[in-house]
Amino acid sequence: MLKGKTALVTGSTSGIGFAIAKALAQQGAHIVLNGFGDAETPKSQIEALGVRAEYHGADMSKPGEIEDMMKFAASKFGRVDILVNNAGIQHVAKVEDFPVERWDAIIAINLTSAFHTTRLAIPAMREANWGRIVNVASAHGLVASAQKSAYVAAKHGIVGFTKSVALETATTGITSNAICPGWVLTQLVQKQIDDRAAREGISATQAQNDLLGEKQPSLQFTTVEQLGGLAVFLCSPAADQVRGVAWQMDGGWTAQ
Ligand code: NAD
C-alpha cells in the first residue's frame, strides 16, 4: 500500500517508534530511522522487510540537527511522504520540584521538535499533494496526571498543533493526526514501574498491576504492534478524510 513512499519516524530505535517504522515498512515504505542507542539492529530489521532504511542520529532537542536530518532524508529519498513525530521522554516530579532543565528538554523533544520536522516536511508534501503527519501524543494529551506537568503540557500542546496543521492543509492531500496511547510496556514505562516498585517496596509485577489498575480499565497494556496498525490505517486511503483527530488507543483510560 505504501510502496515507493518514504517515512521518517523520530525516536525509532526502540519502542513505539520502531514498531511504527516496521509496520510502515511492511506496507512497502522506505524508512528513515532516528533516535539514540544501537541503530544497526533496527536498521537491518527494517531492511530485512525488503525496503531501504537510512539512519540519522539528530537530537530532537536541537533545531539545527533536525534541519540536518530533514535535508539528509531529502537527499536520500527525494522527500518525506510520511512524517511520524514520536520521539519523547518523561520525567516525574511535583511542579515545585521539577528540574528546569527537564522541563525544557521535555517541551523541546516532545513538542517543539514536531514543529521543526513538520515545517520542513510540508513544502515537499504540498508539491506532491500527498502527505501523512502522525504525531504520537498520549492519553496525557487529553487528560492530566499529577507529577507529569511538562509531559502533559507537551502532549496537550501536540494535540493542538496537530489540529492547526490539519486545518492549514485541509484542502490538500496532506493529513495531520495524533495517536494517543495509554500505557504501553516500553523502556519509558518500565522505568516508571521500576521506580514505583523501589519507592513502595513492592514487586515489579505488583507495581505493573497497580499502574494499569489506576488508569487503564482494560487492565492490559496497549501493544506497539496495535499502534503500528493504527499508524498504517492513518496512512491508508481509507483515512483520507481523517483530519485533526486525537485517536485514543488506551484501553478505556480517557473514557472515564
Ligand atoms: P522509548 O523510550 O522506548 O522510545 C523513545 C525513543 O525516542 C527512543 O528511540 C529514543 O532513543 C528516542 N529519543 C529520546 N530522546 C531523543 C532525542 N533527544 N532525540 C532523538 N530521539 C530521542 O519510549 P516509547 O514508550 O516508545 O515512547 C515513544 C513515544 O510514545 C513518546 O513520545 C512517548 O511520550 C509516547 N507514549 C508512550 C506511552 C507508553 O506508555 N510507553 C504512552 C503514551 C505515549
Image (cartoon, rainbow, N blue to C red):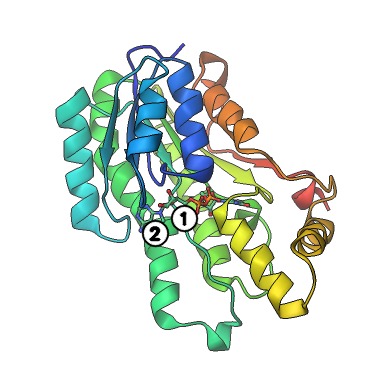
Q: Nearer the viewer, residue 143 or 221?
A: 221
Q: Residue at x 33, y 26 (%)?
A: 81
Q: Residue at x 85, y 49 (%)?
A: 217
Q: Is mark 2 within 8 Å of ligand 1?
A: yes
Percent from the top left, x then y, of residue 144? Answer: 67, 65
Q: Residue at x 62, y 58 (%)?
A: 190
Q: Is residue 244 shown left or right of residue 121? A: right
Q: Amino acid at mark 1?
A: Gly
Q: Quadrant of residue 13?
A: top left
Q: Can you say whether 198 is above or below 43 in the image? A: below
Q: Is residue 118 shown left or right of residue 90? A: left
The disc label shown at residue 88, or none: 1
The disc label shown at residue 109, or none: 2
Q: Nearer the viewer, residue 151 or 89?
A: 89
Asked whether residue 8 is in view, the answer is no
- Mark nearer the N terminus (1 vs 2): 1
Percent from the top left, x then y, of residue 15? Answer: 52, 44
Q: Amino acid at mark 2?
A: Ile
Calculate the distance from the C-alpha at mark 1 to the C-alpha at mark 2. 6 Å
Tag 1 and tag 2, C-beta contact below 8 Å:
yes
Mark 2 crowdedness (10 Å alpha carbons): few <14, some 14-19, many ≥20: many
